[in-house]
Amino acid sequence: MHVDVGARIEAVYAEVLRRNPGEAEFHQAVREVLHSLAAVLRKRPEYAEAKLVERLVEPERQILFRVPWSDDSGEVHVNRGFRVEFSSALGPYKGGLRFAPELALDTVKFLAFEQIFKNALTGLGIGGGKGGADFDPKGRSDAEVMRFCQSFMTELHRHLGEHTDVPAGDIGVGTREIGYLFGQYKRLANRFEAGVLTGKGTGWGGSQARTEATGYGTVHFVREMLATRGEDLTGRRVVLSGSGNVSLFALEKAQSFGAQVIACSDSSGYLVDERGLDLDLLKEIKLNRRARLDSYAEARPRAGFHTRGSVYDVPCDIALPCATQNELKEPHAVRLAKNGVKAVAEGANMPCTPEAVRVLREAGVLYGPGKAANAGGVATSALEMRQNAGRDSWTFEETEKRLAAVMRDIHADCVAAAEEFGTPEDYVLGANAAGFLRVADAMRDQGVV
Ligand SMILES: NC(=O)C1=CN([C@@H]2O[C@H](COP(=O)(O)OP(=O)(O)OC[C@H]3O[C@@H](n4cnc5c(N)ncnc54)[C@H](O)[C@@H]3O)[C@@H](O)[C@H]2O)C=CC1
Ligand SMILES: O=C(O)CCC(=O)C(=O)O
């Protein structure tokens, strides 16, 4: 059968634009994948059959719901909840929940779409989904966050289950929120169904190393990328964006491999400490006090806190964007390349704009896309599901050993797929192609569903 791959891919993208008007982030995520799939379909035209690609860009289910709750003064608020169950070809829908005031369906859809390929890369039998709410937990009391989580779960619970859909955390959702969500699920289901959420407290079904896993995994991935050029992290200058869950544990792992981590950021500005960031102080500020980064510079006068410019202005060997989507733009990439950056790996989801990626790749910088580089978090969630299913609990060392092995395998699969489809060192092509082939094979086996 002759397939005009270029025309086919263009037609799929045109239909995505028509069906999903105004959803720029979703369009961006789909466009990147379709570009990679053109290379795959040219070599393997059989994957153009049965409208696999056409089906893959349409979510299996999208759930939108009202979340009413009362604040501490008794005032009633109404938020919107989301869950996009994108693909169950490889296993139950799996992906985090984000609580952020600006969250809209567009963002949830792009995140859920990315999750399909990321989760496929882990090889751990999980489908792709994502969710959240336009709720801002900042400045809210524990009691308000609890009431919000209870109301959110009162609707969402009917769509969840250890074999159906298994959420976890993301921006604004950590162990505290997962605890409140689990408590409400348990009450409604009248069942202690440990495998229905991951990122739980380690005393009641959570996995060791899940909190650390995304940041740790990103650094394992960077090590693998550097090793392809005979290099390592020792003595390398590293900058990261963000100072949340992913950033702090990427920082911890990079330091443990001998890197000099000199800068990080939050939404108020960026911090530079040329002698190396003090992780204990950062954890105290960010995890315990939930304060802004400028309090670090107050405690350590040698450090500088800046509200103008960007963390990517700081000369470095390795940059790890770990904050949010589309934060590393073309001018940042130009600056990084000019300053001699060797590798950029995405701890966050889609933090680099397409223009920035082009600049980095043209400059010969090793670039690890989030689907591959930050897959350690969801991989460890899948390991949590395994422990729950077996009523087992592994040590931190055992869990981290498995995480490191998953990241090595993901890296190797990306390299192999990039070579097979014609562009060695193109980790975007490698990640999209390797992930797609696993999902597409499962879809073919399961018929038109
Ligand atoms: N938590 C997880 O296991 C995983 C998270 N991710 C992704 O990693 C990213 C960060 O997530 P978490 O660390 O979990 O969230 P978090 O809520 O713990 O931290 C986010 C951090 O980014 C900062 N930030 C937000 N907007 C910013 C901006 N414009 N400039 C600079 N800093 C900014 C915040 O101040 C905060 O320090 C997100 O893209 C998320 O989707 C990806 C894989 C797994
Ligand atoms: O651990 C999970 O299920 C979710 C992780 C996540 O949301 C992500 O990989 O972006």
Image: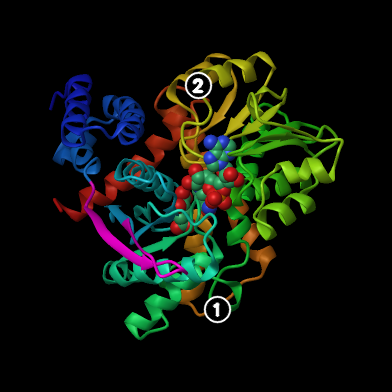
Q: Is residue 216 visible?
A: yes
Label 2 crowd bin: few (<14), some (14–19), many (20+), radius 10 Å = many
Q: Left or right: 410 with respect to 404? A: left
Label 1 or label 2, whichever comes before in sequence order: 1
* Count of numbered tags: 2
- Whole-percent x and y of residue 131? 36, 54
Circle 1/circle 2 CB separation < 8 Å: no
Q: Amino acid at mark 2?
A: Ala
Q: Nearer the viewer, residue 145 or 53?
A: 145
Q: Residue at x 82, y 32 (%)?
A: 274
Q: Amino acid at mark 1?
A: Trp
Please give left or right for residue 51 compared with residue 393 in the image. left
Q: Residue at x 50, y 21 (%)?
A: 356
Q: Residue at x 55, y 56 (%)?
A: 139
The dot on residue 163 is none
Rendered position, 431 above or below 216: above
Q: Is residue 99 left or right of residue 264?
A: left
In the foreground, 123 or 114: 114
Q: Quadrant of residue 81?
A: bottom left
Q: Quadrant of residue 174?
A: bottom right
Q: Quadrant of the N terminus?
A: top left
Give the percent coordinates (x, y) of residue 333: 57, 20
Residue 204 image label: 1
Does residue 66 sit above or below 276 in this rendering? below
**Secondary structure under the numbered disc 1 in the rendered image:** helix
Q: Is mark 2 within 8 Å of ligand 1?
A: no
- Circle 2: element type: helix
> Marks 1/2: CA distance?
42 Å
Q: Quadrant of ligand 1?
A: top right
Q: Which residue is mark 2?
A: 356
For the record, the magenta segment spans: 59-80
The overriding secondary structure of the stretch rendered in magenta is strand
